[in-house]
Amino acid sequence: MWAMNRIVLGTLRRRWLRTLLTGLSTLVAFMLLGFFLAIRHGFAVGPIQAGADLLLLEPVDRASGLPIGMLSSITAFAGVRSAAAMTGTQMLFGAYRHPVVVEALSSNAFLQISGVVGSGELRRAQAQAWLADRTGALVSATAAHEYGWRVGETVVLHAMRGAPAHDLTFQVDGILGKTKGVSLTDDVNLHLGYFREWAHTDSVSVIFIQVKQAGEAGEVARAIELRFSSSATPVSTQSFKSLLQGMAERLADVNSLTFVVIAASLFGLFLICFNTLIQSVSERAGEFALLKAVGFAPLRLVWLVLLEAFLAIVPAAAVGIITALLVIRAFAGARLNLPGIMLTPAGGAECVLTALGLTILSSVLPALRIMRLNCGQVLRKG
């Protein structure tokens, strides 16, 4: 067995450039495969893990807003734990007029629904300071880093060109950190009352509703829609979970296209490996004929071909899968913000089976050629 291994290793070393290029092709293909499987799992599982007890209430006519008085009516519904109204606008900051997204929220309800204090995204002392400061703001960690904002600093934002509103001034009371590497809020988060005074408006864009029991979310949504169906502002109430699932379903088309790309790359890899192996076997036909002539059984010669394919494909595939794991852990989950993004054991097993299948498929025809080799004819040709 050791002698056979030495034969194969010697062959791979002699054709080191071909072996290296085949290995690099395999590494890249399996890195993409592992990354794709992890993303697919994130799309499938991520939306199911979030938003089961949240509802999103919007006006049926998206161009109009919701009257602020609707908020108190919604909080009085049976089954509703809390409700947070939200509206916002875009403004400009600094001499270079960088665009900044301003969001106005029902302060206490926002802290309760989002859980940013309990999760460590916002320090408790900063949350209390914000609640006590009517003109204060929470800013995202991304905006704080980009614009150099610090806690206690007073910031002035300018109205967009052509907008009638005047400048907006606030003090930075807290910085909302990142969850899994992602800022989940807009740049600036103000108290809803302060924003309404500044903008002279009595309407909001949407209302987030947290129900007491996740299983009652559908029933509460239907009750709210029925309550406001004949009002001046009919509303549409959608489960936040179903909203996320709908987004994932729309991404399924992209998912399918990605799968086609990966399948095409694996097929291309198969052609590369097959061509490499059959070329290697053809170049060494004399060696195989000599081994067969001195008594090597055909199955042992087939094993040589399989072993060569295995060593050329599987180690590089393993490195590609490990690289995908490292990339996913370092970047993908944080940037895509899908809780389920990971290469699961089932996904890892799929990669392993793909590598082994590729090894076998690439070896079938070369192995058959070796088994049918005519020793005398090959040796006479020299």
Image (spheres, grey):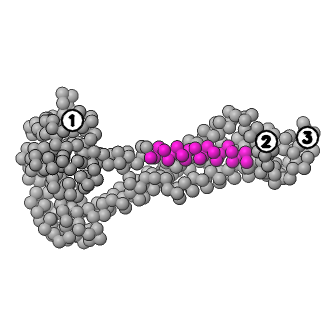
Residue 148 on the magenta span: no
Position of residue 50 relative to residue 13, above or below, is below
Rendered location of residue 178, percent (x, y): 30, 46
- Check disc 1 and give the amino acid type: Trp
Position of residue 357 relative to residue 144, above or below, is below
Residue ID for mark 2: 7
Question: Circles 3 and 2: CB distance less than 8 Å?
Answer: no
Residue 379, disc: 3
Q: Residues within 10 Å of mark 2 (few under 14, many from 20)?
A: few
Say whether residue 81 is left or right of residue 378. left
Q: Secondary structure at mark 2?
A: helix
Say whether residue 39 is left or right of residue 111. right
Rendered location of residue 104, percent (x, y): 16, 48
**Closer-to-camera residue (151/277):** 151
- Check disc 2 and give the amino acid type: Ile
Q: Earlier in the sequence, mark 3 or mark 2?
A: 2
Residue 220 appears in the rendering: yes
Q: What residue appears at the point 10 percent right and 44 percent down from the top-left corner?
A: 135
Question: Circles 3 and 1: CB distance less than 8 Å?
Answer: no
Q: What residue appears at the point 76 percent right and 47 percent down from the top-left corner?
A: 305
- Disc 2/disc 1 C-alpha distance (Å): 66 Å
Position of residue 267 relative to residue 13, above or below, is below
- Check disc 3 and give the amino acid type: Leu
Say whether residue 64 is left or right of residue 296. left
Q: Main secondary structure of the magenta part?
A: helix
The residues colored magenta run 307-329
Which quadrant would the C terminus be assigned to in this image?
top right
- Disc 3/disc 2 C-alpha distance (Å): 19 Å
Q: Residues within 10 Å of mark 3 (few under 14, many from 20)?
A: some
Residue 149, disc: 1
Q: Secondary structure at mark 3?
A: helix
